[in-house]
Image (cartoon, rainbow, N blue to C red):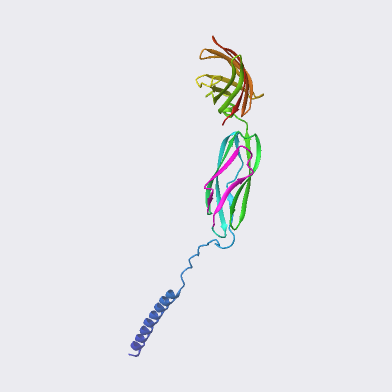
Amino acid sequence: MYLSRMIRVVTTVGRYSLILVSLAVIILGGCSKPSPTPEPYYEPDYGDLKYIIQGVKDVSMERIGQAQLTLFINRQEGKIEDVMMTVVGLPQGVTATFSPSISMPSFNTTLTIKALRAKEGTYKITVRGSSKTSGFTEKQMNITILPYSNAAVGLEGQFNEGGMCTPSGAVGDTVDVVPVEGVKNRINIKGFWSGVWSNMVYANLNVANKTLDIPSQTVNGVTINGTGTYDDNIMIIGYRIKGFTVDDTCTSTFSRLY
């Protein structure tokens, strides 16, 4: 009987011990702290705006040509405010535009640089951002202007012909100059001598010495030939017009209208 009683006591104590252990596990599990969630980092939005201009690099183009760059105006810290983009130090005949030209960083913008009969050479220019609090943020780059691969492109446009013919007298008309498709360094001059654009002659350009030659050709019943000099804006040509009713010797200056 004594032994039986002892067994019951031990069994009861064991049961209580198991219960206490289970409760301890539950309590400890309930009290454990969850893993902390990382806090996102936000750049300061106070103080002067600071940003960098990324994507600037050197470009090359012909005297008539263009290049495009995609720039990233990358905010580092400070107030969020408008940044206006400009280019400083452009050579004559070169323009630059941004799209967009003003926005709040961070943002992308496309810089388009165009050359219109610009002088050959390498030029250092400055890409500039400006804002109210930070003043100017700048990045430098080089533009290299290359010679024409086809000199006829440089003469494209309309010119005023002003000159004198012997014996017929003064000539003063508008002509249209266009490159001849598929033939390098050759132009068509529409309206030559008469101002009538159906009177068209072609001329070959000598790039080395800036001269031009109008080979003998028959146009609307008259034969035309001549020689001259040229640059982007002026052609000076001496030529002869010969037909059944005309025999003129002329000297004309062709001045660019646009």
21 sits to left or right of 60: left
Q: The N terminus lies in which quarter of the figure?
A: bottom left
Relative height, residue 110 to residue 178 (above, below): below
Residues in magenta? 81-103
Q: Is residue 197 magenta?
A: no
Of residues 32 and 237, the one drawn nearer to the viewer in this rendering: 237
In the rendering, at what x and y percent does residue 15 appear? 36, 81
Of residues 47 and 174, the one drawn nearer to the viewer in this rendering: 174
In the rendering, at what x and y percent does residue 155 appear? 58, 27
In the rendering, at what x and y percent does residue 190 appear? 53, 22
Asked whether residue 83 is in view, the answer is yes
Q: Residue at x 57, y 42 (%)?
A: 96
Q: In which image quadrant can residue 79 be found? A: bottom right
Query: Outermost residue, top direction?
Result: 244
Q: Is residue 89 magenta?
A: yes
Q: The C terminus lies in which quarter of the figure?
A: top right
Of residues 247 and 157, the one drawn nearer to the viewer in this rendering: 247
Report the magenta stretch's main SS: strand
Q: In which image quadrant can residue 18 be found? A: bottom left
In the rendering, at what x and y percent does residue 66 appear? 56, 37
Asked whether residue 183 is in view, the answer is no
Q: Residue at x 38, y 80 (%)?
A: 19
